[in-house]
Amino acid sequence: MSYENLVVEVDNYVATVTINRPPVNSVNYATIVEMEKAFDELAESKDVRVIILTGSGEKAFSAGFDVSDAGNAAKAGEEGQRVWTKIFRYTKPVIAAINGFAFGGGCELALACHFRLMSDAPKAKIGLTELNLGIIPGWGGTQRMTALLGRTKALELILFSKRLTANEALEAGLVGKVCPPDKLMDEARAMAGKLTNRPPLAVASVLKAVATGVDFTFDEGLKAELEGTKLVSGSKDAIEGFTAFFEKRDPVFKGE
């Protein structure tokens, strides 16, 4: 797969998607289009079970929307919200390796991922900073930050455009782990490696059920959970899981 604004690499069931728009990996409309294409292709690949999403260089994960692409701002707003939501509902785990600052749409992209690891580099900060420009988060940030942190904390961060350091983000619950800059990708790959050994059908079913409950209603989430239960109960992976348990060995799941 070849892209103008992204670099996509696959190794050992793990795809690494790197936003490659130096110096700050800002996102224009073309990047959003490529992001959807990449994630759609990776969703269909049996060689990919986990995705790591990061930014090129050491300065930024993503500074958000590229203001030099203002002519496409309206359609980028709609498509950014839709594609980031697609990532939130993705049925393969997505790990954000936040290697520098993540502001605005870049923060919203990280929020759309299932897991967030962040570098504790001195200049690495994260936040929804749109109000400084007289606009609001428009790619899902108002909803996902609230769901993650609660109403009061989310409003504090959004209305005051706060920029949190890695440790502040960890304390707030915005990220799950803080890493030294030179260890960030190692930690992301280690987590991804563990996830690749989990049963793919069951992982997908859990991700779908959780996203459904968050995005819709508790009852809809329960329906998705029941559908997932029925799907995995008759799978070869379930047979392998029980067989390995009784044989006292590690299971080898194939996603079947």
Image (cartoon, helix red, strand yellow):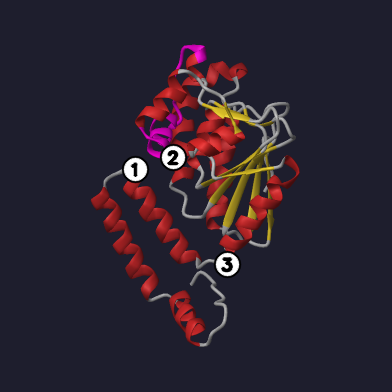
In the displayed structure, does residue 114 sit left or right of residue 120?
left
Judge depth for marks 3 and 2 and give the one in front. 3
The residue at 44%/26% (across/down) is 138
Instruction: Point out residue 177 in the picture as x, y percentages from the top left corner.
Output: 59, 45
Look at the numbered discs 1 and 2 and tell me whether their residues touch, using CB distance below 8 Å. yes
Of the image marks 3 and 2, the number of the one nearer the N terminus: 2
In the image, residue 7 sits, relative to residue 125, either above or below, namely: below
For residue 144: magenta?
yes
The residue at 45%/32% (across/down) is 81
Residue 215: give its label: 1
Judge depth for marks 1 and 2 and give the one in front. 1
Q: CA distance from mark 3 to mark 1?
A: 28 Å
State which region is magenta: 132-150
Instruction: Point out residue 149 in the picture as x, y percentages from the top left corner.
Output: 42, 36
Q: Residues within 10 Å of mark 3 (few under 14, many from 20)?
A: some
Identify residue type, mark 1. Asp
Secondary structure beneath dot 1 equals: helix
The residue that disc 2 covers is: 85
The residue that disc 3 covers is: 197
